[in-house]
Amino acid sequence: MKPLVSVVIPAKNEAANIDAALRSVARQDYPVERIEVVVVDGDSVDNTGQVAKDVMAAHRFHRSDVLTNPGGNTPSNLNAGLRWAEGEYIVRVDARSAIPSDYLARTTGILVNRPDVVAVGGSQVAAPRSGSTVHRAIAEALNNPWAMGGSRYRRGAKSGPADTVYLGVFRRSELAEAGGWNEHFSTNQDFELSQRLLARGTIWFEEGLPVRYLPRGTVRELFWQYHRFGRWKSHYWRAPGQRPQRRQLVLLLAPPIIATFAIACARLLVRWNLLGRIVVGALAVGAGAARLRPTRLMSWVVNGVVGAGWWTGVVRGVVRDDVTAR
């Protein structure tokens, strides 16, 4: 008999998205009667909980429930689900994600056969909310691995050890022993958990497990989302023994280096009186850009906005560490 797995889904105001997340769990190759599902609702003002109950009632899960966690942030909701769970394995699924049909079988199989592995996950693949240019550009930008930090789960790397994974599947006993998710980190809680788990074993990225993710719908929302990520990342680096990783250092140093280079080039151009050449070059660039897809051009803008949001968030966190647990 397959081991019982517990799927934990934190949610808040996700009535429009929770259906797809739950149906992706129900469509697993894994026996549905060996899957229990809990949605932990943190103060939704829509009918997230009722939608979740209706979807779960239509499937023969081993056990399912909707918990209400008043005032709960994401890690608090996850820990409430961890306390509810009875399965041997904990599978984190977000309300705006959809896991592939072989996700449970492959991730739990790795944990069964690899006692050194303490967490396993697949890649994050952003999907457009609609066919609009903006939504397709947002998805394309978030699927640009290098502009988004180059972590293993973003760049579609080969299977192997990683410093963190998207969402994650864990042994319940080990996750509980580690203290679950740190409720102080309302953002970056997955990375913080991964760093604690690395002291116990290997974090494993498994290729060929694309998890569909539905991003924010506007560029403005993305800016503030990644600004918040940057602030919390800076806050995390303040902890004893923590520091930016090499790929994060590249993101931190890139803006001032690019700005310095641009200023130096501008000064040289003025000195060498190359204004005419600049105009010709600009016209050439404009002609080339006109042949590019509007979605591609817009995705570059989105990458710039996301990078600016994260970088300014880090700077704000360095200057003033004002994050809160909510």
Image: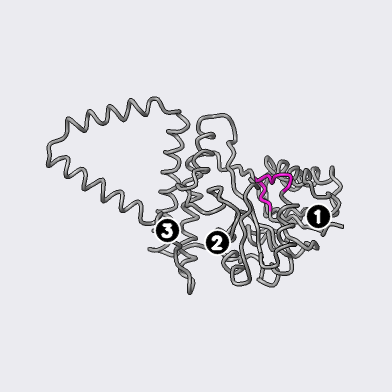
Find residue 102 and name its label. Answer: none
Residue shown at 45%/33% (left/top)? 296
Q: CA distance from mark 2 to mark 3?
A: 20 Å
Q: How is the image coloured?
A: one colour
- Decide: is 119 above or below 273: below
Q: What residue is disc 1 on?
A: 36
**Could you tell me the amino acid type at mark 1?**
Glu
> Split into 4 quadrants, where in the image is the N terminus?
bottom right
The magenta stretch spans which residues? 93-102
Mark closer to the chain start, 2 or 1: 1
Question: Residue 184 occupies which quadrant of the picture?
Answer: bottom right
Question: Residue 2 occupies which quadrant of the picture?
Answer: bottom right
> Split into 4 quadrants, where in the image is the C terminus?
bottom right
Is residue 326 at least partly visible in the picture?
Answer: no
Q: CA distance from mark 1 to mark 3?
A: 39 Å
Residue shown at 59%/57% (left/top)? 160
Whether label 2 touches label 3, CB < 8 Å: no
Question: Residue 129 occupies which quadrant of the picture?
Answer: top right
Q: CA distance from mark 2 to mark 1?
A: 28 Å
User: Is residue 310 shown in magenta?
Assistant: no
> What is the chief secondary structure element of the magenta stretch?
loop
**Could you tell me the amino acid type at mark 2?**
Asp
Label 3 neighbour load within 10 Å: few <14, some 14-19, many 20+:
many
Q: Which structural element holds mark 1?
A: strand
Residue 280 percent location from the top left of the image: 23, 28
Q: What residue is disc 3 on?
A: 314
Residue shown at 43%/38% (left/top)? 300
Q: What residue is disc 2 on?
A: 163
